[in-house]
Image: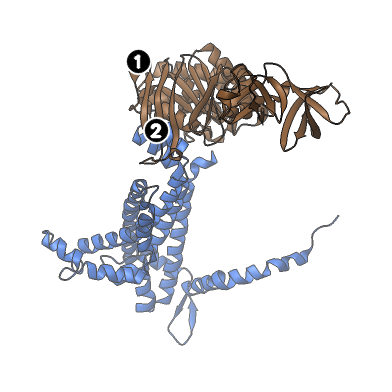
Chain colours: A blue, B brown
């Protein structure tokens, strides 16, 4: 009996249209720009892979990419372990739970440009609480002039803003562990480290994969907070990929290189996310 | 191996217990002999798990002492008490292999690798886990996981006692029976003290030498399964053990010492006449197995017959009182109205305020 009916394809049409308009068509516009040159007047000339070659060989792109990788690595190295430690230290019953949860959720509720603005003022060397205190403590600190101070502030801001996310994810995983596991571990004479290594970490593994992926992608695309805080400066010291991309696209109006760079940027994130995911879930496939 | 003595042990989960209801355990005082198989039986919330956790050291008692042989362990951590405990839901360390799971309690105590290897292999073969020693524990079935939990208890040679907290709840019925026999066989091979918490009377009665019946934080009766059946100390035990439970009827004892239910004489009280028993709430308790149909006695109406396969349960009524009787499947139910019931001599017990008097 024939059960196929080609008319069924119409049922997926709405989804196709939706995806086309919100993803495929905008993306194709970028692809279109990336292989053409324009001098205004809406005139375009085909240039092939010229822009891709230019971006890939440009020192400016490599510098921005290195800064981006450096930034993402640092914040992952800080936020993931710190998030796990805070989640482990949080209370599991009593009034402390809600207090902690509200405190943790707070940074996540603040709009990103406001976070940038808060830290911009907070870290000012003359009137900002943080900047002023650091200077009083003997560190000649001025994030608008010193690259190291700018990086320090940028990383501190991101850690403040996003560690909560890791904490909340890990905390959710921890509260899902039945008491019997901890009791069995006590009976088995397990040390605190063994409890963490053998019970808590395995139970947190899945959410940690999510946390690492989210933090990787988000930090790799960071724009608003960084631009409000340092604007990419001093000099180009904190010009991350997205900041550089906006400078090229909107500052210089170089649509071709900007489009080529967008695509390369996109592919890098896709590739690295896939590698992260593949490595971290390798065990499960056994 | 050790004899476990509980001295006036009480526990409350409230920081400042005031009234009786605050206590999860209200003064337990007895001795578990070394090498015995004990069952802790009682309804949910009666304090049996609390008692177990006190013995293993997961909880500190509010009052009282716990003594292993001559050593007071009341304030000691579980790891130094040499107690193993198996929980209701199987606990396995799922990133480890079965072998590593079984070796875990020994490695934590710094036992030498050769000894660990020997113990793990012997326990694995006793439990039938040899074949899966190198598998990840995560992928196993519930009963295999529970065997691993059990194995982690058995692997330590120095354990004073192994405590089981309703360990067969998550196991399929047909495997339950097998695992229980395996457990019993293991206990016969190596004489560790075994304390087994359950709310399932069949499990308790088939498993243990001594059954401890608990209710509302108190030990009601300790005895062999036969004693609990034949002579329950308290109406609670009579009702809780046995299926269906004991019939309980309000009675009075007259001047001559005759026990009467609604005016019908049942038997003679061996504990004096009504004068010293009059004030108390008196009840007669008799198991459905010992109720008989007679030519005369308590007139009743038959209201229900429940066929339980190997037997039939007859439910009679006299006024508002219900009396159950067990009849073997082969015997016929005579057809007459009303029926008259009597009790087998010496099988009915007299209770005052719930506690047995005769």
Under tag 2, what secondary structure? loop
B31 or A135, nearer to the observer: B31
Q: Which label was assigned to residue B59?
A: 2
B336 or A52, nearer to the observer: B336
Mark count: 2
Q: Are marks 2 and 1 in contact (CB under 8 Å)?
A: no
- Asked if residue A96 lies left or right of residue B87, the reply is left
- Asked if residue B194 lies left or right of residue A235, the reply is right
- Asked if residue A164 lies left or right of residue B267, the reply is left
| Residue B345 image point, x, y percent | 70, 16
Q: Residue furthest front?
A: B255
Q: Which label was assigned to residue B70?
A: 1
Q: Residue B347 is drawn in which quadrant?
A: top right
The residue located at (39%, 36%) in the rendering is: A195
Q: Residue A234 is drawn in which quadrant?
A: bottom left
| Residue A21 image point, x, y percent | 57, 73
**Would you call the spot at circle 1 few (<14 residues within 10 Å), some (14-19), or many (20 or more)?**
few
| Residue A80 image point, x, y percent | 36, 50
Label 2 – label 1 distance at C-alpha: 21 Å
Under tag 1, what secondary structure? loop
């Amino acid at each position: 009996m024939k059960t196929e009916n080609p008319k069924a394809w119409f049922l997926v049409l709405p989804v196709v249209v939706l995806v086309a308009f919100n993803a495929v068509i905008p993306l194709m516009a970028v692809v279109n720009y990336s292989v053409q040159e324009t001098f205004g007047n809406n005139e375009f000339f085909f240039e092939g892979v010229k822009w891709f070659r230019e971006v890939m060989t440009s020192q400016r792109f490599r510098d921005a990419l290195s800064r981006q990788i450096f930034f993402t690595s640092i914040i992952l190295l800080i936020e993931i372990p710190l998030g796990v430690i805070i989640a482990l230290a949080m209370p599991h019953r009593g009034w402390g739970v809600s207090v902690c949860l509200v405190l943790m959720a707070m940074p996540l509720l603040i709009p990103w440009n406001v976070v940038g603005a808060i830290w911009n003022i907070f870290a000012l060397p003359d009137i900002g609480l943080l900047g002023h205190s650091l200077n009083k403590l003997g560190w000649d600190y001025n994030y608008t002039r010193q690259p190291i101070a700018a990086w320090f502030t940028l990383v501190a801001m991101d850690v403040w803003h996003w560690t909560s996310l890791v904490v909340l994810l890990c905390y959710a995983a921890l509260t899902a562990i039945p008491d019997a596991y901890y009791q069995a571990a006590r009976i088995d004479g397990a040390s605190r480290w063994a409890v963490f290594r053998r019970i808590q970490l395995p139970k947190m593994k899945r959410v940690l994969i999510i946390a690492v992926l989210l933090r990787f992608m988000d930090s790799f695309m960071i724009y608003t907070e960084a631009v409000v805080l340092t604007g990419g400066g001093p000099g180009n010291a904190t010009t991350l990929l997205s900041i550089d991309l906006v400078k090229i696209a909107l500052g210089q109006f170089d649509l071709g290189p900007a489009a080529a760079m967008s695509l390369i940027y996109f592919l890098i994130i896709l590739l690295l996310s896939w590698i992260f995911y593949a490595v971290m879930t390798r065990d499960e496939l056994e | 191996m050790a004899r476990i003595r509980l001295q006036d042990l009480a526990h409350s989960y409230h920081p400042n217990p005031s009234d009786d209801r605050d206590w999860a355990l209200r003064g337990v005082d007895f001795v578990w002999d070394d090498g015995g198989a004990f069952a802790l039986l009682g309804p949910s919330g009666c304090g049996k798990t609390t008692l177990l956790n006190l013995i293993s050291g997961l909880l500190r008692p509010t009052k009282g002492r716990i003594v292993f042989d001559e050593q007071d362990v009341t304030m000691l951590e579980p790891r130094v008490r040499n107690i193993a405990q198996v929980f209701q839901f199987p606990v396995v360390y799922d990133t480890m292999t079965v072998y590593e799971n079984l070796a875990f309690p020994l490695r934590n105590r710094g036992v030498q690798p050769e000894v660990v290897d020997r113990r793990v292999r012997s326990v694995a073969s006793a439990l039938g886990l040899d074949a899966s020693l190198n598998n990840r524990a995560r992928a196993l079935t519930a009963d295999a996981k529970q065997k691993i939990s059990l194995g982690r208890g058995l692997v330590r040679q120095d354990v004073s006692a192994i405590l089981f907290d309703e360990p067969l709840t998550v196991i399929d019925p047909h495997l339950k029976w097998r695992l229980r026999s395996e457990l019993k066989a293991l206990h016969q091979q190596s004489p560790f003290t075994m304390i087994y918490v359950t709310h399932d009377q069949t499990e308790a009665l088939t498993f243990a030498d001594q059954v401890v019946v608990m209710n509302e934080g108190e030990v009601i009766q300790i005895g062999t399964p036969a004693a609990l059946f034949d002579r329950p100390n308290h109406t609670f035990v009579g009702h809780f053990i046995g299926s269906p439970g004991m019939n309980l009827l309000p009675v009075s004892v007259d001047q001559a010492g005759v026990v009467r239910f609604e005016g019908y004489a049942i038997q003679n009280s061996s504990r004096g006449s009504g004068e010293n028993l009059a004030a108390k709430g008196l009840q007669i308790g008799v198991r459905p197995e010992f109720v008989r149909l007679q030519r005369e006695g308590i007139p009743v109406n038959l209201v229900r017959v429940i066929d339980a396969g190997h037997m039939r349960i007859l439910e009679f009524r006299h006024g508002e009182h219900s009396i159950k009787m067990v009849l073997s499947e082969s015997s016929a139910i005579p057809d007459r109205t009303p029926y008259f019931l009597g009790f087998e001599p010496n099988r009915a017990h007299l209770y005052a305020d719930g506690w047995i008097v005769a």
